Image (cartoon, helix red, strand yellow):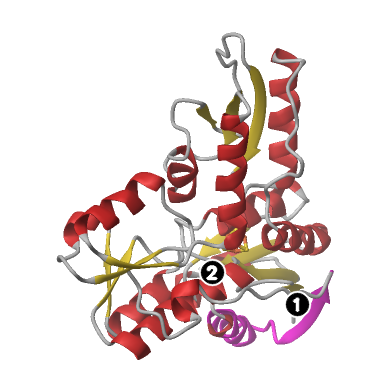
């Protein structure tokens, strides 16, 4: 019979909770349909659930009818998207995580102070697209796995990062960047959010004891994918990402005595419970929680939902 080490913190962060409640509250107050630009958070289950309740997920604003209500996702949007919404007269509610907004503000501040900025992150990720849009002529997106050289002209160089990267990989990327640009200026604080850091720390604490780690999360969830990378780097024998327990493979359990379990910041706890049931049915019923820290942070809802004000 095997054991399960259940990492904590795991699952919902404050930004995801706020974004999901924002869509629920918008549906409650204004009724269906509520349009949502991009997936509100990167989790298939959450998106399907909100769709059933009247949310309509779109990729771009041109899919939103004139006069409709649209929510911007937790990952943030570029100023161009906000301007387009205003030009179209759309009613908007911005569910951007405040920790992403902080990076946007820092990008604007640095650009105004005359810096070229390296934004360490994944170019195709919505968060990076949004931050890039704050100062596209000054920001150079750099994949953490391949830091290179940047043409800065006479300007000083600084850096920012996507909020959900792996801490170690990001610090290594910064050091490589510094080798090429010795006068690189550090930002006042790094941008990897508390939730990404805590989930990585928790999985690092269990991974060396696990022949197998299973992370619950969707394939397009950056922070969930990083948990798999971090588990492998920390010594897990194998690590996999699954959207639901049904996607786990019994063969992964061959010869395994200890399984580590965690979940990304956009994953409802019910999906972890589902995986624990799946493991229990296969002889892994002994679940030991391993908690590295407690989280208490919460964010207030977007301004548009804090009063009787109509979104606009
Ligand atoms: S993972 Fe971090 S940045 Fe992203 S929504 Fe959660 S708290 Fe905000």
The circle on residue 116 is none
Question: Which x, y percent locates residue 312?
Answer: 32, 69
* Residue at 56% across, 76% down: 17
- The correct choice, above or below, for 15 with respect to 208 in the image is below
> Can you name the residue that lies furthest to the left here?
65
Answer few, some or many: residues within 10 Å of disc 1's Cα (few below 14, many 20 plus, some between 14 and 19).
Answer: few
Q: CA distance from mark 1 to mark 2?
A: 17 Å
**Element under label 2?**
loop
Callout 2: CB less than 8 Å from ligand 1: yes
Image quadrant of ligand 1 equals bottom right
Q: Provide the residue designation for mark 2.
A: 266
Q: Mark 1, mark 2: which one is toward the viewer? A: 1
Quadrant in which the N terminus is drawn: bottom right
Report if residue 122 is visible in the image: yes
* Residue at 59% across, 79% down: 272
**Element under label 1?**
loop
Q: Which residues are magenta?
A: 271-292
- Front residue of this view, candidates 144 and 305: 305
Q: Provide the residue designation for mark 1.
A: 296
* Residue at 61% across, 82% down: 282
- Front residue of this view, candidates 88 and 226: 88
User: Magenta segment: does it hold 134?
Assistant: no
> Can you name the residue that lies furthest to the front here?
309
Report if residue 146 is visible in the image: no
């Amino acid at each position: 019979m095997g054991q399960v080490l259940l990492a904590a913190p795991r699952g919902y962060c404050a930004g995801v909770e706020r974004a999901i409640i924002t869509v629920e509250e918008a549906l409650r107050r204004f009724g269906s349909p509520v349009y949502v630009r991009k997936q509100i958070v990167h989790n298939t289950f959450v998106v399907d659930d909100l769709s059933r309740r009247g949310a309509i997920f779109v990729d771009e604003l041109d899919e939103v009818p004139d006069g409709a209500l649209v929510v911007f996702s937790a990952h943030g949007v570029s100023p161009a998207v906000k301007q387009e919404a205003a030009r179209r007269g759309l009613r908007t509610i911005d569910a951007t995580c405040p920790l992403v907004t902080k990076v946007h503000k820092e990008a604007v501040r640095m650009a105004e102070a005359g810096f070229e900025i390296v934004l360490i992150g994944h170019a195709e990720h919505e968060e990076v697209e949004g931050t890039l849009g704050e100062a596209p002529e000054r920001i150079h997106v750099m994949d953490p796995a391949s830091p290179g050289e940047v043409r800065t002209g006479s300007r000083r160089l600084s850096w920012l990062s996507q909020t959900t990267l792996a801490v170690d990989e990001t610090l290594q990327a910064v050091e490589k960047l510094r080798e090429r640009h010795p006068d690189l200026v550090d930002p006042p604080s790094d941008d990897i959010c508390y939730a990404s850091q805590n989930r990585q720390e928790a999985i690092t604490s269990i991974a060396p004891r696990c022949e197998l780690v299973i992370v619950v999360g969707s394939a397009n969830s950056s922070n969930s994918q990083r948990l798999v990378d971090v588990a492998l780097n920390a010594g897990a024998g194998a690590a996999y990402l699954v959207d639901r327990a049904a996607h786990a493979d019994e063969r992964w359990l061959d010869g395994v005595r200890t399984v580590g379990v965690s979940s990304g910041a956009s994953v409802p706890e019910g999906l972890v419970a589902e995986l624990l049931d799946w493991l229990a049915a296969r002889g892994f019923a002994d679940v030991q929680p391993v908690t590295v820290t407690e989280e208490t942070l919460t964010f207030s809802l977007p301004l548009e939902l804090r009063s009787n004000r109509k979104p606009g």
